[in-house]
Amino acid sequence: MSVKFAVLGHGVVGSGVVELFYKNKKSIEKRAGTEMDIKYILDLRDFPDSPYKDKFTKDFNDILNDDEVTSVAECMGGVEPAFTFVKSCLEKGKSVSTSNKELVAEKGDILLQTAKEHNCNFFFEASVGGAIPIIRPLHRCLAANDITKVAGILNGTTNFILTKMYNENMPFADALSLAQELGYAEKDPTADIEGHDACRKICIISSLVFGKHVYPKSVYTKGISQVELCDVAAADVLGYAIKLVAMVTKLSDGKILPCVMPTLVSYDNIMSGVNDVFNAVLVYGDGVDQTMFYGRGAGKLPTASAVLGDVIETAKSHGTVVSQTWEASSDDSFVEGIDSYKSRWYFRVPADSKLDGVEVYNHDDGLSYITVNEMTFAEAKAKAAALGALAYMPVME
Amino acid sequence: MSVKFAVLGHGVVGSGVVELFYKNKKSIEKRAGTEMDIKYILDLRDFPDSPYKDKFTKDFNDILNDDEVTSVAECMGGVEPAFTFVKSCLEKGKSVSTSNKELVAEKGDILLQTAKEHNCNFFFEASVGGAIPIIRPLHRCLAANDITKVAGILNGTTNFILTKMYNENMPFADALSLAQELGYAEKDPTADIEGHDACRKICIISSLVFGKHVYPKSVYTKGISQVELCDVAAADVLGYAIKLVAMVTKLSDGKILPCVMPTLVSYDNIMSGVNDVFNAVLVYGDGVDQTMFYGRGAGKLPTASAVLGDVIETAKSHGTVVSQTWEASSDDSFVEGIDSYKSRWYFRVPADSKLDGVEVYNHDDGLSYITVNEMTFAEAKAKAAALGALAYMPVME
């Protein structure tokens, strides 16, 4: 048997999939236990200089209607036409591996169900944490656990900016410009710096772990644009690094509480040492206690590594459904609102604020930086208003 | 269909498997897609107060000859009788999941081959890194990569001791006594502190990644008993933490070089922040660049989590062979000797040593602590002799 697959999209990720596949074809085939080859590459552009130019097509139907193609790697991005293409492939029994987090966050439930109905697989390892193996470990290796919390640094751009602010005392705006120069941030960086990208990824993780589709609109999301150098410096003195943390917690009533917020992470927590464009996901369960997965969250070959890992799995598991499904959700009543989110908190307040029972760092800039014991988000918000706080963020030990 | 499995051994790990399984039975069955139950627990001792006392047997043949048992969790430890029991089970087509690193390091090739011949699986996620998902990610998720290096902190006892030396300036002997008091080290701690345990684990990883069985006797292994507080303090000044690192590197001629040595790990390397009894494995590949897996390397429930993850996988993959096999090796000619191991190095030398072109930290204890540029192990050994060095260790950035 030989497995033929198609690559949809020849942008950064798609071209990486083609490159990495041909570089390691021999060892990939050994691990897959079968010969493998790319039969089509779908892209509307021309690539006359590509060594694989004979494989290019502009017509998706060439792929859809070729029964020899049993596996498809979707690397186009965006919800449409990716959704239509992927769904059509699954309905024909072709397994699909995707790096497209928007697609999974918005349509994962439908696509998993479609795959199941047509005895094939929908894999999305590359959609969260780039190169980091996290999806398969979460639902396979940790399957014996009651998972109580997942917390991650899921966006490389914001982590790069925060690392520059921390290591080089570089103001937010300058760090953002540098990230744009280096190609880590887009021209319109909103999706990264306002936390929307991290939000999509914690939605995918939440859906997978807790079995019900969680939509981005149900998740409280705050980005890093209001984090200032004085916060980063004060957090350091107090023993913390500021990270954009995407988190989901299982509550005692069975509901879940996902959120995305800049967070003070203790130096005793291994996640505080995750720097630059690297991502990490920390998983808490009753068996494992805690386990962390770390690596490059984006980039051509890292993301291609994850997509190809999935493609190899489609070859090995052809004819059986091994991907996890989760339920569609008609409402978000199982998602708890942010107001009841419990945490310790950090406040930046005027130095003359009346404070008691808190850890205080008074700085000569006329401000105080304090951490306080556990309270809800609603209580912290009220306290921030009462204190005239200029900023407040949760604290994670 | 309902899957019945047996647990061999009711010690720390075996009893953890039973406990965690019944705690999370409902969600485990959901993830496995089938009903599951433990039919037998094998132990020579009596457990009259166990809620599962009806499941105990002292006769292995009860399990071997019961065709209803399709999956077995081996948690006895040691090579015999574990090897005989596991091999008999596989020959009857019963899949086996084990936490037994000695067994895998000594007999992995034979057992994987036996499983393949009898259309069942031999899984060993728990044998390396305890709770940490590492085996399955290595051979499934990272299957598209040319893996060039794996470096890990694979022994919790030594990492606990080194952390105490670092954080609390506690001498080696005191830290070892404390580890014994806390149950982290055995009465005879040789296997841990001299690196033999870490050696077994890097053998398993090397065999899996490079496809040929690597025996512990082929691997240069040095433990931490000669690391002194002055080394730990000097390394800190130079920007490093001392860790017992088990490593395997792929060389340009296709050979591999596995070794275990106390190593100075740069503070810029995420692995330097892995403390206490935690383990971590850092994997380098041409696709992923680098990715790290972190968690508890031992303990009742963490190890049980990994064993049960495998047992669930045996249920899901019943009738297909998904476990990786590797070749038996009649000699170790594909394993390069330690003499050609290349690294930067650290030396502890008398302060009057003649030094040039090196990073030096002169301490008022009359000694100098230096790091030097890349050279081979053989060269470093000769240099150490020439300098009258009191200690030398590799340096990892």
Image (tube, coloured by chain):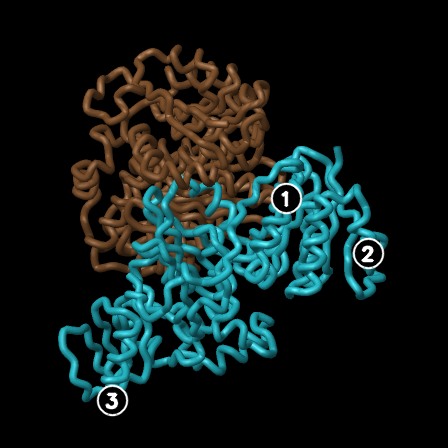
Chain colours: A cyan, B brown
Disc 2: which residue: A56
> Which-is-in-front pick, marks 1 and 3?
1
Q: Is residue A240 above or below residue A190?
A: above
Q: Residues within 10 Å of mark 1 (few under 14, many from 20)?
A: some
The kind of secondary structure element at disc 3 is loop
Q: Earlier in the sequence, mark 1 or mark 2?
A: 2
Specify the subunit that label 3 lies on: A
Could one spot residue B344 in this view of the protein? yes
Disc 3: which residue: A366
Q: Which residue is at the front of the view, B120 or A90?
A: A90
Q: Which residue is at the front of the view, A195 or B273?
A: A195
Q: Residue at x 49, y 78 (%)?
A: A175
Could one spot residue B393 in this view of the protein? no
Quadrant position of residue B334: top right
> Could you tell me residue A252's position as x and y percent?
30, 54
- At label 1, the amino acid type is Glu
Specify the subunit that label 2 lies on: A
Q: Is residue A4 above or below residue A234?
A: above
- At label 2, the amino acid type is Phe
Quadrant position of residue A188: bottom right
The kind of secondary structure element at disc 1 is helix
